[in-house]
Amino acid sequence: MLPTLPEVALKVREAVDEPDATASQIADIVITDAALSTQLLKVANSALYRGTRAVESVQMAVSRLGQESCHKSGDGTNVPSLF
């Protein structure tokens, strides 16, 4: 697994802390890091979060997981514990 770039993780954290941040804005940050994008898509399509449709974009993954989960995923503290 590729490590998430620290700069991207910090940008995600800052965006999530903004009360008016949108899923689209957070997704725009996440897609700059291939490892984090892949990680979020994998979790969003896992049995724990999967809905009736597969998640095919980072924006859909951010929407499905919620901002707090994306924050934790960016830190690397949430996603590994799910598997």
Image (cartoon, grey):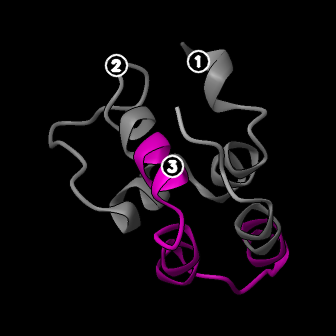
Tag shown at residue 82: 1
Q: Which residue is mark 2?
A: 47
Circle 1: element type? helix
Q: Amino acid at mark 3?
A: Ala
Q: Residue furthest front?
A: 2
Whether residue 49 is situated above or below residue 64 in the rendered picture: above
The magenta-colored residue range is 12-40
Tag shown at residue 13: none
Name which quarter of the figure residue 82 lies in.
Answer: top right
Within 10 angstroms of label 3, few (less than 14), some, or many (20 or more) residues?
A: some
Circle 2: element type? loop
Q: Amino acid at mark 1?
A: Leu
Name which quarter of the figure residue 52 lies in.
Answer: top left
Q: Quadrant of the C terminus?
A: top right
Whether residue 22 is situated above or below residue 46 in the rendered picture: below
Q: Earlier in the sequence, mark 1 or mark 2?
A: 2
Q: Which residue is mark 3?
A: 35
Whether residue 20 is situated above or below residue 62 in the rendered picture: below
Q: Earlier in the sequence, mark 3 or mark 1?
A: 3
Within 10 angstroms of label 2, few (less than 14), some, or many (20 or more) residues?
A: few
Q: Amino acid at mark 2?
A: Ala
Q: Which residue is located at x 51 percent, y 49 percent?
A: 35
Q: Is residue 27 left or right of residue 82?
A: left
Q: Is residue 55 left or right of residue 16?
A: left
Within 10 angstroms of label 1, few (less than 14), some, or many (20 or more) residues?
A: few
